[in-house]
Amino acid sequence: MEEPKIDDFHQAVRPFLLLSQLFSLFPLGGLFRAPVQEISFRWISLRTLYSVYFLATALLTFIAHVYYSATRDHITTEAISNTIYYSMNFSGAVTLFTIAMRWKTIMSEWRNLEEPFLHYPYAERRFWTLRRTIAIVGIFMLVLAFVEDFLHVCSVYYTNQQFFIRCNNSIPFWTLFYEREHPKIFHYLPYSLPTVLVLEVTHKIFLYVWTFMDLFIIFVSLGLARLYSRFHRHVLRYKDRHATGTTWHQLRLEYNRISRLVEYMEGIMAPIVIFTTTSDLYFIFIQMYNSFQFSASFISELYFKFSLGFLIFRTLAMLMAASNVDVASIKPLNVLRSVPMSCWSIDMAGTLITYELVLLKEAIASRDDGDFCAGGKKLF
């Protein structure tokens, strides 16, 4: 019987890494070459220069916004929200850039640890392969993000059009539009087409980075949880069955391979998880607070409600995917802990007895028969 097609993490996620290059993220070469060793990061390349360009313009945008807000008579909630938005997304973009620099090493380590689970007896023919799952989740999230951005454009266009008609039509509409939407920039720079283009590109990349940080966490979580699921389905065959001590020993070693990969990725993903969770939760609270004071046109209200719903859905999806790694790790662990006594080897039994003796010794050493009241000891 022919073995199922290799369903590894790198092949599943690389289409979205390539898409991200349009938005200055993951400036890597060799993404679609078979071995991960072909992945390359080069400082002197158009991809990297594009990424550095965004980081530079994003930093300047953040500085201009902070300086503009600090020189006003009072700081509004909107100014604080925008400061947090720019700072979190800039920090996330820098973190993703550093991950891209190490992506070859990261994927080499990932592939080395996941290799046994890509073949028999772990590989299975399933409709919901990792590649298909990541593709559906990623496309669905990006489509929702596109709809949100479209509604935002329609909302601000309508609002500025009404302002232009009713309040101020002394200057061209598009000049008024951008000066009202980006006062922090056009307070220091005159309106011009090159400035608008740079501003629009930077703004769209900011939006993509915000969405992609959630997606990236979801992708990594799906990949790790899938390894535990493959191992769990395999180890269930041995539940309550007699197997040699060598078999159980090998199963524990393979479970440890996945756990080592999870620990390795935790160190890499920790900054992104912090930035993303902080940003998402803050803006959920801000949007909910603003909902009690919101009153505008139908299209603006539609955008606001859709944006809030999408943000809550995206945050919950990210948190649930991340927490599912722990849930998936417990299922096979319960099976491994239920080794029948008939399968115990001399070494295994000796290890357990030694462990029990150590615990007993510690319990005896910590026992205190003195006066409870005099010694200030606890009852338990």
Image (tube, grey):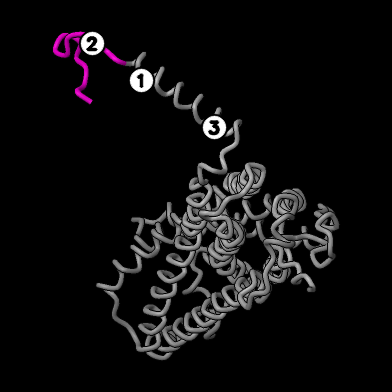
In-image side of 180 versus 19 (left or right): left
Q: Is residue 87 visible?
A: no
Instruction: Quote the CA–CA distance across marks 3 and 1.
Output: 21 Å
Q: Earlier in the sequence, mark 2 or mark 1?
A: 1
Q: Secondary structure at mark 1?
A: helix
In-image side of 143 versus 160 (left or right): right
Residue 307 painted magenta: no
Are the residues flagged by discs 3 and 2 in contact, CB closer than 8 Å? Answer: no
In-image side of 378 versus 12 (left or right): left
**Secondary structure of the magenta portion, mostly?**
loop
Q: Secondary structure at mark 2?
A: loop
Instruction: Quote the CA–CA distance across marks 3 and 2.
Output: 33 Å
Name the kind of residue labelled 1 in the image: Ala
Task: Residue under label 2, please give it.
Answer: 369
Which one is nearer the viewer's eye here, 154 or 96?
96
Mark 2 nearby-residue class (10 Å; few <14, some 14–19, many ≥20)? few
Instruction: Quote the CA–CA distance across marks 2 and 1.
Output: 13 Å
Residue lying farthest to the bottom in this orientation: 165
Residue 376 painted magenta: yes
Query: Bounds of the magenta span?
Result: 367-380
Q: Which mark is residue 213?
A: none
* Residue depicted at 69% across the width and 58% down the height: 117
- Give the quarter of the figure containing the C terminus: top left
Q: Earlier in the sequence, mark 3 or mark 1?
A: 3
Which one is nearer the viewer's eye here, 3 or 134?
3
Q: Secondary structure at mark 3?
A: helix
Q: Nearer the viewer, mark 3 or mark 2?
A: 3
Name the kind of residue labelled 2 in the image: Asp
* Residue depicted at 39% across the width and 59% down the height: 282
Q: Which mark is residue 363?
A: 1
Q: What is the total number of numbered labels drawn onto the structure image?
A: 3
